[in-house]
Image (spheres, rainbow, N blue to C red):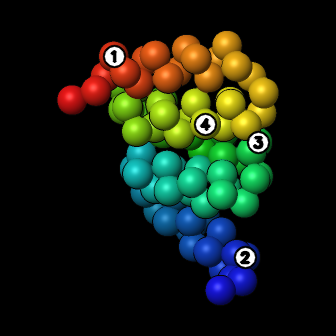
């Protein structure tokens, strides 16, 4: 709906209130990822990974960031890690 600034502010406030919630960081990363704001997406997914290192969803999303940034070895590493942590 073209209300990106409001959405970003909502993510920022939610994360401020619940900084240990990996899902908020991941959702924020997805918000940035679809807008091709790759540095912000990477930072959000790295924080989510720090909170849940074995989370295969976060690992796949981080792999997508690395892939889109042309960082293929890093993408392959996190994709492999994601596969190791499949339920």
Task: Say what secondary structure mark 1 lies in.
Answer: helix
Name the residue rendered at 40%, 51% in the picture. 23
Q: Where residue 64 is drawn, which disc sits there?
A: 4
Q: Which residue is mark 2?
A: 5
Q: Is residue 42 above or below residue 77?
A: below
The answer to whether the residue labelled 2 contacts the one labelled 4, judged by CB atoms less than 8 Å apart, is: no
Q: Which residue is mark 1?
A: 84
Residue at (50% x, 56% y) in the render? 27
Q: Is residue 58 visible?
A: yes
Instruction: Compare residues 66 and 50 and report the one nearer the observer.
Output: 66
Distance (Cα) linking label 3 and label 2: 17 Å
Of the residues under marks 3 and 4, which one precedes in the sequence?
A: 3
Instruction: Tell me which residue sits at (43%, 17%) in the image.
Output: 81
Q: Is residue 7 above or below residue 48?
A: below
Tell me the residue that label 3 is attached to.
Answer: 39
Distance of label 1 from label 2 (alpha carbons): 37 Å
Callout in the foreground (2, 4): 4
């Amino acid at each position: 709906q073209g209300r990106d600034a409001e959405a970003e502010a909502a993510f920022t406030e939610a994360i401020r209130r619940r900084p240990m919630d990996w899902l908020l960081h991941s959702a924020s990363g997805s918000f940035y990822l679809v807008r091709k704001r790759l540095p912000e997406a990477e930072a959000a997914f790295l924080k989510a990974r720090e909170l849940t290192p074995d989370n295969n969803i976060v690992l796949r999303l981080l792999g997508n960031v690395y892939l889109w940034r042309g960082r293929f070895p890093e993408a392959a590493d996190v994709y492999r890690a994601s596969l190791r942590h499949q339920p």
